[in-house]
Image (spheres, rainbow, N blue to C red):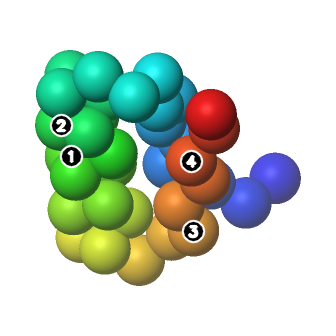
Amino acid sequence: MPRTVTAGLDGTPHGRAAADWAAREARLRAVPLRLVH
């Protein structure tokens, strides 16, 4: 199974921070990013 970084968004500043972190991790690991709202 391919690896994927997944983060949940809920419209709060913490959700935005989670998305930013997830995007950095996905880029560093060269894997897809999945954002769930």
Q: Residue at x 53, y 61 (%)?
A: 33
Badge 1 marks a residue whose secondary structure is helix
* Residue 32: x %, y % from top left: 57, 68
Badge 4 marks a residue whose secondary structure is: strand
Q: Which residue is painted at 61% across and 53% down in the image?
A: 34
In the picture, the disc for residue 17 is: 2
Which of the two discs, 2 and 1, sits closer to the camera?
A: 2
Does label 2 or label 4 sit earlier along the sequence?
A: 2
Q: Looking at the rendered structure, which numbered label has been put on residue 21?
A: 1
Q: Nearer the viewer, mark 2 or mark 3?
A: 2
State yes or no: discs 2 and 4 in contact (Cβ < 8 Å).
no
| Real-space Cα separation, disc 1 to disc 4, in angstroms | 11 Å
At which x and y percent is residue 35?
Answer: 56, 47
Q: Earlier in the sequence, mark 1 or mark 4?
A: 1
Q: Which residue is mark 3?
A: 32
Q: Does label 3 or label 1 sit earlier along the sequence? A: 1
